[in-house]
Image: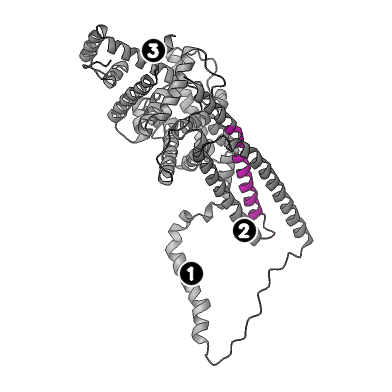
């Protein structure tokens, strides 16, 4: 049963001491003889008191490593982001157009139609690095990448068991996030492939692997808790 | 930071601090005394300023100390605004924004208020992205972190409040989380949400009314449950 004189919102303002003294006194007098207001005030006080005492959940242990990794990547590769190039964008574009003109357009203008154009030899793939130390480093990078892949595969298997208990929406979100992580791995792998012997590419690739592992580990860990909570929620009153 | 504390009074923390914070508080203070609380707030402000300076100088240890000081609050906020599934992603995004923005932090607001603002923005923009990508959203699931079925009145009520919070519209939920759960003043809430103090107050009262309505519809009478 609701009171027709005071809304719950107004009583909430009274609980917080926001009403002018005169109005607060009227509410107090009214509430003494109104069962609905007395009940509402008691409920509001219980809500406020217990809201302030709600648990503060502990973040997963993987949170800090993932933040640190992301910050490191930004510090190392931040210069590649578009925003850093904005001040130079106009000049860079003009420069790029000029280069294209010089490299491609001028030879075309100079080319004589009657001159037979010799066919270019087929492009050969770039030769493997000849330096034995470089080869050794590349082999080690490959081994490390394989180890990361194995860890990811194991975590994926564990996660599949948890996923069976998730809602389709949760599974969809998980697939979406994993796809984004896979994209990051693929682009890092491409960067590493294009720059053999340069550790930066491989470091970026490993950071991407680590991020995916941290995410999967957290999902496996939290997935169990979410499942248990769902069950409790389902059978609760 | 001194400017910030002069411009806006900082409410003493209503929840215990965790992690690295323990090492940063002033020893020998007795909780409960007004003077001691004021001294603690002042000490926290000084610690905040020192921490921010150290981070600006590139001290990685201080960066981690700041993370530990605010990790539970940022994560809890994320859990309550976006739900447990996306909370880690949002908390990560919030901390990246915090560390990237720290060089520009001028101390116009208390550090905690500024951090809350970035965390709320990260959570709300995450929700907006999700909303544009998904169908009508289901109520968020809030992991109450309760290890077993609550057995006494207060615990049952808190579990029910968590679940009802997850069903509140996000605007109401954010205000009630910041004010009632996190214990911030309306001035801070308004600063975080970029609204007037009056708006923060009216939204809070509407949110509480809706929360009570939802609990009552579920057959829960908060006062009776608390006393039971």
Q: Determine the image quadrant of residue A67.
A: top right
Q: Chain of mark 1?
A: A
Q: Which residue in the protein does label 3 denote?
A: B223
Q: Chain of mark 2?
A: A
The residue drawn where x is 43% and y is 17% is A50
Q: CA distance from mark 2 to mark 3?
A: 61 Å
The number of discs equals 3
Q: Which residue in the protein does label 2 denote?
A: A190
The residue drawn where x is 20% and y is 13% is A22
Nearest the camera: B193 or B67?
A: B193
Q: Secondary structure at mark 3?
A: helix
Residue located farthest toward the top when viewing the structure as drawn: A33
Q: Which residue in the protein does label 1 denote?
A: A96
Nearest the camera: A144 or A17?
A: A144
Q: Write down the region rendered in magenta.
A: A195-223
Whether B154 is drawn above or below A120: the answer is: above
Residue A159 as seen in the image, left or right of residue B74: right
Quarter placement of the C terminus of chain B: top left
Can residue B218 be seen at all in this image of the molecule?
A: yes
Q: Chain of mark 3?
A: B
Q: Secondary structure at mark 1?
A: helix
Horizontal and vertical percent position of residue A129 = 73, 64
Nearest the camera: A151 or A76?
A: A151
Horizontal and vertical percent position of residue B113 = 42, 31
Q: Residues within 10 Å of mark 2 (few under 14, many from 20)?
A: some
Question: Which secondary structure type mostly characterizes the magenta part of the structure?
Answer: helix
Horizontal and vertical percent position of residue B207 = 34, 26
């Amino acid at each position: 049963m609701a009171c027709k004189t005071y809304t719950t919102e107004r009583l909430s303002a009274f609980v917080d001491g926001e009403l002018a003294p005169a109005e607060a006194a009227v509410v107090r007098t009214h509430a003494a003889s109104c069962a609905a207001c007395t009940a509402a005030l008691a409920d509001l006080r219980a809500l406020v008191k217990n809201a302030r005492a709600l648990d503060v959940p502990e973040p997963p242990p993987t949170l800090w490593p993932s933040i640190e990794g992301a910050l490191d990547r930004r510090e190392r590769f931040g210069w590649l982001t578009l925003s850093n190039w904005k001040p130079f964008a106009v000049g860079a574009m003009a420069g790029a157009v000029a280069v294209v003109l010089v490299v491609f357009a001028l030879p075309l203008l100079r080319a004589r139609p009657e001159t037979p154009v010799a066919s270019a030899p087929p492009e050969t793939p770039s030769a493997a690095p000849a330096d034995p130390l470089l080869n050794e480093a590349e082999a080690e990078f490959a081994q490390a990448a394989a180890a990361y892949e194995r860890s990811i595969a194991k975590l994926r298997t564990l996660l599949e068991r948890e996923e069976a208990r998730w809602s389709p929406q949760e599974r969809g979100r998980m697939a979406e996030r994993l796809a984004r992580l896979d994209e990051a791995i693929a682009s890092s792998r491409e960067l590493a492939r294009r720059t053999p012997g340069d550790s930066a590419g491989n470091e970026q690739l490993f950071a991407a692997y680590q991020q995916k592992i941290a995410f999967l580990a957290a999902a496996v860990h939290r997935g169990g808790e979410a499942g248990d909570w769902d069950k409790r929620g389902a059978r609760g009153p | 930071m001194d400017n910030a504390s002069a411009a806006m009074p900082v409410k003493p923390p209503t929840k215990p601090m965790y992690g690295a914070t323990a090492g940063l508080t002033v020893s020998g203070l007795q909780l409960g005394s007004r003077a001691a609380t004021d001294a603690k707030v002042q000490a926290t402000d000084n610690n905040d300023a020192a921490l921010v300076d150290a981070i600006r100088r590139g001290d990685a240890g201080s960066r981690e100390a700041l993370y530990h000081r605010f990790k539970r609050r940022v994560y809890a906020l994320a859990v309550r605004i976006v739900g447990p599934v996306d909370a880690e992603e949002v908390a990560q995004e919030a901390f990246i924004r915090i560390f990237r923005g720290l060089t520009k932090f001028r101390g116009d607001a208390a550090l905690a208020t500024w951090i809350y603002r970035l965390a709320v923005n990260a959570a709300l923009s995450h929700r907006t992205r999700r909303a544009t990508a998904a169908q009508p959203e289901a109520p968020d699931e809030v992991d109450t972190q309760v290890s077993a079925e609550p057995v006494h009145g207060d615990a049952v009520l808190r579990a029910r409040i968590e679940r009802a919070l997850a069903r509140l519209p996000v605007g109401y939920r954010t205000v009630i989380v910041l004010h009632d759960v996190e214990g911030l003043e309306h001035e801070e809430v308004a600063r975080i949400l970029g609204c007037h103090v009056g708006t923060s107050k009216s939204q809070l009262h509407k949110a509480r009314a809706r929360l009570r309505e939802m609990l009552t519809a579920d057959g829960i009478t908060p006062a009776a449950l608390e006393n039971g």
